[in-house]
Image: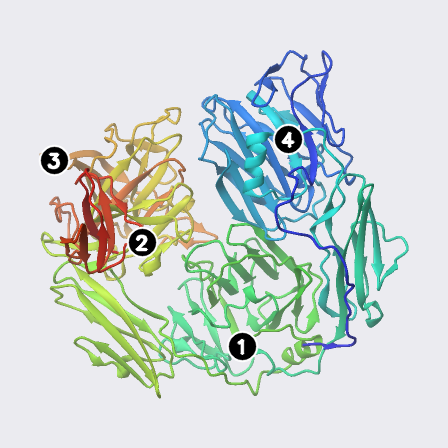
Amino acid sequence: MKTKSILILLLTGLLAASSTIAQDVRQGLAAYWPMNTLVGTGPVTTPDLVGGYNLTGPTMTGTEIVSGQFGNAISFNGSTDYLFFTNTPGVDIGVPASRRGSWTIALWVKGTGPGQANKWYFIEGSSTSINPVTGFYVNNNTNPLCFVRDSANSTRVNAAILTNGALDNTWHHLAMTYDLATAQFRTYVDGKLDFNSSFVPNYAGSTPPNQVGIGAQVRNAIANYFQGAVDDVALWNRALSQAEINQVRTNGIATPIPTFPPAFSVLPLGATNLITGDNFTLSAVAYGTRPLAYQWLKNGVPLAGATNDSLTLTGLTTNDNGSYALVVTNVAGSVTGAAPVLVGDWPAPDLTNGMVAYWPLDNVVGSKTPDLVSAYDLTLFNMNAGNLTAGKWGNALAFSNATQTMARRVHNPGDLLPIYPRTNFTVSFWTKAPWSAGSWAFAEASTLENNSAFCLGQRGTFNDKLNTFIRTTAGVQVNDNRISTNVVWDDTWHHIAWVQRSIGAGAKAELYIDGVLDGIVLAPGYPVGVNNTALGAFGRATPGQWITALIDDVAIWERPLSPAEIAILSASYITNPPVRTTPLVISSFKADFAAVAPGQTNVLRWDVPANATQVLLQPGFGDVTPITVGGLGSVTLTNLTASTTYVLTVKRGLEERKATNVVGVVAGVAANWALLDNFDFYAAGPVGVAGIWSDMYSNSVQVVYDGNNRLIRTVPTASGAYLRLRNLKMTEGQARTLFFRMIPKGGPVGALRQALGLTDKNIRFNYDTTSDVGPSVQLTVNDSSQNPGDWQLAARNGPFAPLTFATNVFDPNAVYRVWIDITNVPFAAWPPDLDLFTVHIQKEGDPTRTTILTDVVSDRDITYVDPVLGPALPDLDKLFVSSQNATASAWYDDFYLSLGGYNNTVPRPYGYAGLPLPPLTIQPSGAQLEVLWTEGVLQEAPSVTGPWTDVPSATPPSYLFTPGADQKFFRARSN
């Protein structure tokens, strides 16, 4: 780290911003429109009781006053009525509230949702642009929606559907809050927390919000008029607590509004990680009765001309060290907030200091290439020692888009990697390649979802410069394909270094190419929930965007390197990497499938440290150290007849670690069927936790219970997951049958789309599964105007064709069997031969099945090469389930694939087929009854048919209760 040149003394006796509830809920109130009156006959105004920021209704006549929640309200006709207030851009009056800092928006609304598509009843935006946008609207159903897009055109909250209340033609209270200090966004419906997310907005856009609109989408043009009424609209320059929201909802806002002294919602934040030559901006956000006056001090002395809420220091030297303070004053008082500024110099070069990982890429051990520092060895995918070639220094690894190669490590809790979440770090590597479309040389991503990304590589369209990309876990692209100024992709060796350090509340990143600071302006952002580091591809839940390139000498530090150290790296290689002792951990121990049919094979795999001295697997295998190469090992399980718990023991000297894995066997499976999954060996919750299914959105597909039976469903948002078929994949020329059960739950609303099928595609998100995906069906509503609609199955008959609907309507909550007969035609036969599939259904209890779709042409286009996902591949190697609907989901169970040819039998009866359920008995215990059970969750119900609920605080082996006059049933649910 850099050396510090002076000791900083903070000012004392200063008032600080408080996160506690304000004594008066009106503190921080920026505007309050009671909506009780309209002045004039056209145009009209309605008064603001805080700062006089009256709303104007250019087309309204004054006759729109109706009875409200508190006094009167104002109604809007859905065609011409709206109110607005426009502020001069850049003038600090606290309105719009979402301009910067922390804020709250609250109002009452009454209207009918169905029939109103994209109709806005509150919005903060710009009078000159369609960006930014913060507001509430309705989109053809009874649930309100909220939306937030900042002035840099980054969507932070995308059409979040609120569910705790409804636009049902009665009054409902809505509120949204944002706390910049915690980055938390929350919405409340009738005082109840309904939706929350985390983000940090970008206020650097060219069009900050300067306008408030009610009754329509009021931006640079007026559109999307709302029909209904609005009452008691209020804006705060701080985030109200839930208790304060309910206080406003219950009591309204008392008038007149008193004056309040200033207070900080965001205190000035200094920086002690600055280097000579840096620029740095101190800023704060204050609220209180306007106008507010600002004065910056340095070491207690006012700075001339420093009278704004921010202070920019340029070309820093040690003379700029000191304690800076901002004094905010109004008619009611003042408040002071202080922050230190400390400037230092780079330390002497020492490349061993803070080094976390070093992959020289000179050799391959088994299926890994070693890290010489922390033993964070990278696992090779579709690669081996044959991919070693002459590099910049010694050997390098040759990566290929055509064969989808990748080197990746999924890190363990407590590891020093991935590095991007650490904010202070350096990534260094050498690469040599011509340009190829949209591929990554270095990437950190998540195997639990597909959004989080920190990537360095190539642009999708031709560009010989380095492409940089950062996307948060919420899907916000904070560093969206920013391109270097210097050439990288000219098929010669270049050195790349990303250097990042935290400064104040943010982070500063710099890019060096061949030892020279590049002119690119980078924008690191957080949170980015990565869990792995990869070379040659984007190693997320669905890997993709493989690069064709040579990569050499990759190293990572947990500190920013100095320019002098970067110059050394750009001219030589690392000769003396430090060696860290890392904990003994079992990174992975799992089977390819959670359960199989008797006699069906399964593969058990493990990933342990390469320096483990002994690896044991029981029962049946013993010492498996000889087949554990580079830390990776596997055994094929054959002739399985019963569920078995396997124990893996790893030793290193005196250290020892154990892991267990249950491999299920489901009895009674009909001939010629292989079990893919029946979910009876999973706990309730996200299906991806077990590591067998890959969830595209982390936890969007859930295991649920139907009695003891277990199924999966999609959550009410964009969702999807897939299962790798491994040795059961459908190869070219095969004809086989996919079987599953489904239960359509509830009545779907709007244009429902749930998709299910087999694919060769490296699907990332749900929208990758709705076309050009492979033999699949979509559970959907035919007429999107139905509310609710009918469940039907549909499919695309050919690449990019519209959906063809089967006429059969599914009964909600009934169990259906579905068979899909699939032919995977060899690519060489296309055309005239094409992939075909036929769909049959049978309701449980019906005597026969019905064919509903015949000889449908698969929609995958083998001639199209997706610039991100790559070309079509010959084998169908994944089963997927996805949804893009927020109102309903089918439940799915019992996925089977025929072993050869079509199969029209039922693999197994519907119901639970997992491990034996925990036993349960009830016996007298004095005046009480005692429930005895050994494991699982105790549940109770008033009847044997339910509804079943968990018994609070009940833990095995005993639960005592006093019997009453009513009957009570108990059961133990397996975890």
**Crowding at label 4, few (<14), some or many (≥20) Cα neighbours within 10 Å?**
some
User: Which residue position holds label 1?
Assistant: 356
Mark sitting on residue 953: 2
Give the distance between the C-alpha atoms of the residues marked 1 and 2, in whole angstroms. 45 Å
Give the distance between the C-alpha atoms of the residues marked 2 and 3, in whole angstroms. 40 Å
The number of numbered discs placed on residues in the rendered structure image is 4
Residue 933, by quadrant, is bottom left
Q: Position of residue 742 (x, y in %)?
A: 24, 41
**Residue at image x 56%, y 32%?**
249
Q: Would you place residue 63 above or below residue 83 in this image?
A: above
**Crowding at label 2, few (<14), some or many (≥20) Cα neighbours within 10 Å?**
few
Q: Earlier in the sequence, mark 4 or mark 1?
A: 4
**Residue at far right of view:** 304
Q: Secondary structure at mark 2?
A: loop
Which amino acid lies under the numbered mark 4 shown in the image of this protein?
Ile
Q: Would you place residue 914 above or below residue 102 in this image?
A: below
Q: Earlier in the sequence, mark 2 or mark 3?
A: 3
Which amino acid lies under the numbered mark 3 shown in the image of this protein?
Gly
Give the distance between the C-alpha atoms of the residues marked 4 and 1, in whole angstroms. 56 Å
**Residue at image x 59%, y 51%?**
183
User: Which residue position holds label 4?
Assistant: 253
Q: Earlier in the sequence, mark 3 or mark 1?
A: 1
